[in-house]
Amino acid sequence: MKKIASFIENNHLRIFSLLLFFSLLPIVISQGKSYITIHDNLDSEIPMRVVLARSGTMFADQGEIEQIMNGLPRNTMPSGMNVVMVLFWLFPPLTAYIINYILVHVIAFVGMYLLLRVHVIKEDNLITSGVAFCFSFLPFYTIYGLSIAGLPLLLYAILNVRNQKKIIAGYLLIQFFPFYSSLVYVGIFILIALGIWLMIDLFRKKPVRGFLIAILLLGVSYGFVEHSLILSQLEPGGFLSHRSEWSSWASKKSVTLTEALELSLSNFSYGQYHAVSLHTYILALLVPVTLIYLLISRRQSRLLIGLLYICTLFSLSMGFANWNGWIPIKERVNLINETQIRFYWLSPVLWYMIFALALDIFLKNKNGISREITVAAISLCLVGQTIYIGILSPEFTDTLTVALDSLTGKQNQIITYDEFYSVDLFENIQADINEPQSSYRTVSIGIHPGIAQYNGFYTLDSYQNNYALENKEVFRKVISAELEKSPNWEYYFDSWGNRCYIFSEELDSYLIPKNESHPIHHLELDSAALRDLAKGKDIYVFSAVEILNFEENQMEFLDYYENSESPWGIYLYKITAD
């Protein structure tokens, strides 16, 4: 036991660095045979960056992206100065994704390790490297760069500056962060949180000059990177986003005080899938034991209690974001109505600081338990958390499953990166259309339009978190009859509308593989409105299901496409321009 404990303590950084290396291998080796997260990733974020990288407007502030929604304003797309966007500009899409994937997880490990070693645990031990690995192993939405994974490194730099240590390096790291993260998703809330922290320091009469400069540097850097987006929001009478019509998205489930509290408790207990933390067992098992131990031993950990308090506040901010008490204010202040409160994106780094603090309390206990037993218990906690994260990390586990099944010849229903975009299938469709892709427009039914965008087609439909309200209103005319038949799709589109898709009352999904396909009998589209959107161009319809009444929708059936490598079966229809 002593030898094992001694080996772990003396080689902890090598052990967990090696684990990080092996955790990255499945996707690096499998490449296009990997499972890559579909929701808010393959279906939208990746196609958006692929289109922008190919558009020639990468570093432009104005103009339109003709390939999306017949002219999506450039300033609604990611900044060309963002590191993720630069990678998609420099490399093929999958290569860019994998490079970014590696960078994000490695920086998460390094950042958490430095934060814990210098500012939290303040020792180089098993806990610093073990918790750093657990944090880096989380299934981040890496397409958002360092928005969550880089928070430990940012906090490390800010604390250095605040404590007047390594100031130049701290300022450089702070200045870099906006180039590799999202202002909308996390930057705004970092700046607000830091502003509150600064006010607390002022109240306590602490020196704040360096801290203030750090906050200003972070804000100015975000302003530089996202200047086009910011200016578009400030321009009077300018671009009016569809977000201005949001009617408290998700308010069906969280409108009362009781429901808001329930949602807060859920976020506190489980987190949120975009800001994944997988801290449930840390909270349910380790934290209560730690608090009881502190109470019995009459010890204190003000930092641990403070972090739990902040996590509580962040969860309450999410739960009460759609509370009906806010509705009168949201209706009067458009900026609030258009903004999703995302302080909870800051929670993952706090939960893993709590994890480290709780383990450190037991490592330093003086109750007669041998260090070897304590090290073994801490190792079991780290192993347990690693297994829990691994099980709930689809890009890791599903990629391994696909690789193992391919070796044994076993079939599975996991859709890989190559299968999702089915480049060969859509190349066959384009070859049969035999016209320049810019000369016509497409819409998709039962399949994400992002797939068509990735394959170079010009789409009238799209999944966008910011586009013109006018476009939404016109598109609604196209699908108004189907929305009237389906209250669920009607609420989904009218109250949110990021998925500007052709919905059918007969379909309960917008992604239908060929083995689940069933025909639509009574599709009702406003073909005239669809032609208006296309502005005189022919329209090709990519449908994952057969449309039996296609003639009633002024469509011409052309052909059916499938192959053994693709999960999709595409019925191709044409609506000729008048």
Image (spheres, helix red, strand yellow):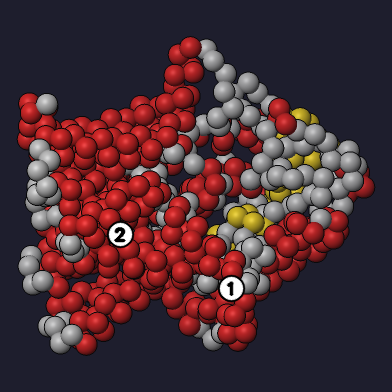
Q: Is residue 177 above or below residue 325?
A: above
Q: Residue at coordinates 63% horizontally, 29% vertically from top-left?
A: 567
Q: Residue at coordinates 15% horizontally, 35% vertically from top-left?
A: 373
Residue 345, by quadrant, is bottom left
Q: Nearer the viewer, residue 86 or 401?
A: 401
Q: Nearer the viewer, residue 86 or 348?
A: 348
> From this viewpoint, is residue 395 visible?
no
- Report the residue marked by disc 1: 257
Q: Is residue 286 left or right of residue 473?
A: left
Badge 2 amino acid: Leu
Q: Nearer the viewer, residue 538 or 404?
A: 404
Dot 1 or dot 2, earlier in sequence: 1
Residue 183 in the image, given as x and y percentages of width and height: 39, 67
Q: Is residue 485 above or below residue 37?
A: below
Q: Residue at coordinates 71% horizontally, 49% vertically from top-left?
A: 443
Q: Nearer the viewer, residue 246 or 473?
A: 246
> From this viewpoint, is residue 134 visible?
yes
Residue 76 in the image, given as x and y percentages of width and height: 51, 66
Badge 1 amino acid: Leu
Instruction: Name the outermost residue toward the right.
Output: 552
Q: Is residue 173 left or right of residue 343?
A: left
- Report the residue marked by disc 2: 350
The secondary element bearing badge 2 is classed as helix
Q: Is residue 399 left or right of residue 10?
A: right
